[in-house]
Image (spheres, helix red, strand yellow):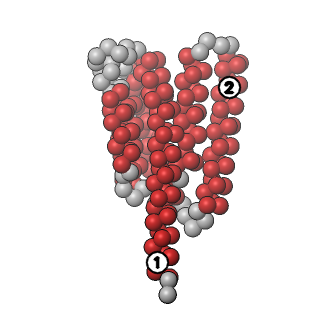
Amino acid sequence: MRYMWYWQGLRWAPGGLLLLTTATVTVVPMPWPVRWIIWLVAVVGSARLHSLAGRYYARMFPNIRPGKLSHGGILASGLLLAALVVDVVWTPPVVVTAVVAAAVLLGYGLATGGGRPHHVGGMAVLMALAPLPVIGVVDDARHRVLLWLFACGVLYPVLAVLDHRELALKHRQCAGRLRRTTMV
């Protein structure tokens, strides 16, 4: 169960709530102090939920530990940030951030023990966002970023819960095999 730590989806689900909050406070008209307070509460709440999920996993799956550290997360974050800048500054005919996010999801799946089937659905949704500027659905930089924030804000918790489900299934399968091999 070498890569199972990365399948602890409930750790990552709060990130989607933070993306949705970021998009929402950008769209809904409100005074800037209220906007920042709401966003700050969302950041603290997401961090708290992440911590609670970590404790849950430590209790429920005590044998699952983090793998060796790599620079993949930093690289993925840098690529996504660069793609957001390209979408905001250059506004190319496709949503570059969606294409990069799909590639990051593919890389994440492969780097953490093989892609999970539900990641293919997430990549398909992200790639479906890419051509929307060409067909006139999103026209300016603000709409591109908001579209990506809302889409990823929904995808993040959905894929995270499905990762958690996969982890629970794999854990049960391993426990079942262990029980069968120790029976006399």
Q: Is residue 92 above or below residue 176?
A: above
Q: Residue at x 47, y 59 (%)?
A: 169
Residue 148 location, x and y as percent?
44, 27
Q: How many marks?
A: 2
Left or right: 54, with 33 as reference point: left
What amino acid type is highlighted by mark number 2? Ile
Residue plotted at (54% across, 36% down):
16
Is 135 on the left-hand or right-hand side of 174? left
Q: Position of residue 24 (x, y in %)?
A: 57, 22
Query: Can you tell which of label 1 and label 2 is closer to the viewer?
Result: 1
Tell me: 32 left or right of 2. right
Q: Which element carries disc 2, helix, strand or loop?
A: helix
Which residue bears the numbered disc 2? 38
Is 134 on the left-hand or right-hand side of 91?
left
Q: Is residue 135 above or below residue 164?
A: above
Q: Secondary structure at mark 1?
A: helix
Q: Nearer the viewer, residue 184 or 132?
A: 184
User: Label for residue 62?
Assistant: none
The x and y percentages for residue 150 are 49, 27
Local crowd size for mark 1, using a 10 Å CA cut-off: few (<14), some (14–19), many (≥20) = few
Q: How busy is the neighbourhood of tag 2: few (under 14 within 10 Å), some, or many (20 plus)?
A: some
Q: Which residue is mark 1?
A: 180
Q: Is residue 182 above or below residue 84?
A: below
In this view, the residue farthest toward the front is: 184
Decide if residue 49 is in sight here: yes
Tell me what residue is drawn at x 68 percent, y 30 percent: 40
Q: Alpha carbon of mark 1 to alpha carbon of mark 2: how far?
A: 52 Å
Callout 1, which amino acid? Answer: Arg
Comes first in the chain, label 1 or label 2: 2
* Residue at 30% from the left image edge and 21% from the top image edge: 93
